[in-house]
Image: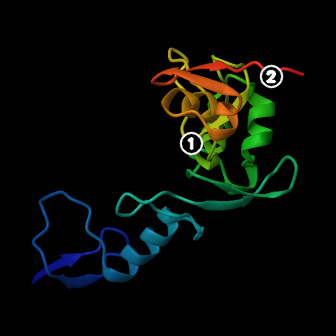
Amino acid sequence: MATINCSICNAEENVPFTPKAGSVVLCKSCFKTHKKAKAGPKKHIPRTQHGTRVSLFIDCSDCGKPSELDYVPRGASLKDVFCAECAARRFGDKSQWAEVIRAKEAETRTEWAFNCHVCGREDYLKFAPDPARTYECNRCYSDQVEPSKERLQNKAPVEKNVFIRKRTDN
């Protein structure tokens, strides 16, 4: 234990370390007061721990609706924060906020629509389609692998997986 004189109130106190020469050293009560003044009023600000996502619940200062942010805004008080929609409207469609909205929508999506390149019919994928690839609907894909019984009706087999429609005399 070392004895110090507080740099603020000049009180004498024992501390569990040896201070460096010329450094500012505070007594316990001045340290607590200085720490509270430096930190400012307590706010409920979430932290990222163990790689988890941040969730900050706010009331939008523009539209007033409650919203959830995936980040802690820097340089703005919690009274001056916007929901993602108001921020995108205010800062433009190419802003970071608009990208956040698109990313959230993509995260919640479970199916993506596409048009079959064989028959042109709309179908859905469980993943985002690659624009460089062509996709077939379930019906066209299944018929290439193994035709359904309904599709084979009135057709004669020519060879494996090749069928010709039979004539019906009416």
What amino acid type is highlighted by mark number 1? Lys
Q: Amino acid at mark 2?
A: Thr
**Front one among 154 and 49:** 154
Q: Nearer the viewer, residue 166 or 73?
A: 166
Report the residue marked by disc 2. 168
Tell me which colouring the rendered structure shows: rainbow
Helix, strand or loop status at disc 1: loop
- Residue at 74% across / 48% down in the picture? 83
Q: Position of residue 147 (x, y in %)?
A: 57, 33
Q: Residue furthest top?
A: 132
Is residue 18 shown above or below 167? below
| Residue 126's disc number | 1
10 Å neighbourhood of mark 2: few (<14), some, or many (≥20)? few
How far across and how far down the image is residue 131, in percent?
55, 18
Q: Residue 61: x and y, percent?
A: 81, 51
Label number found at residue 95: none
33 shown above or below 151: below
Left or right of residue 88: residue 157: left
Image quadrant in which you'd find residue 30: bottom left
Left or right side of 21 for 63: right
Q: Quadrant of the N terminus?
A: bottom left
Q: How far is mark 2 from mark 1, CA to CA?
A: 41 Å
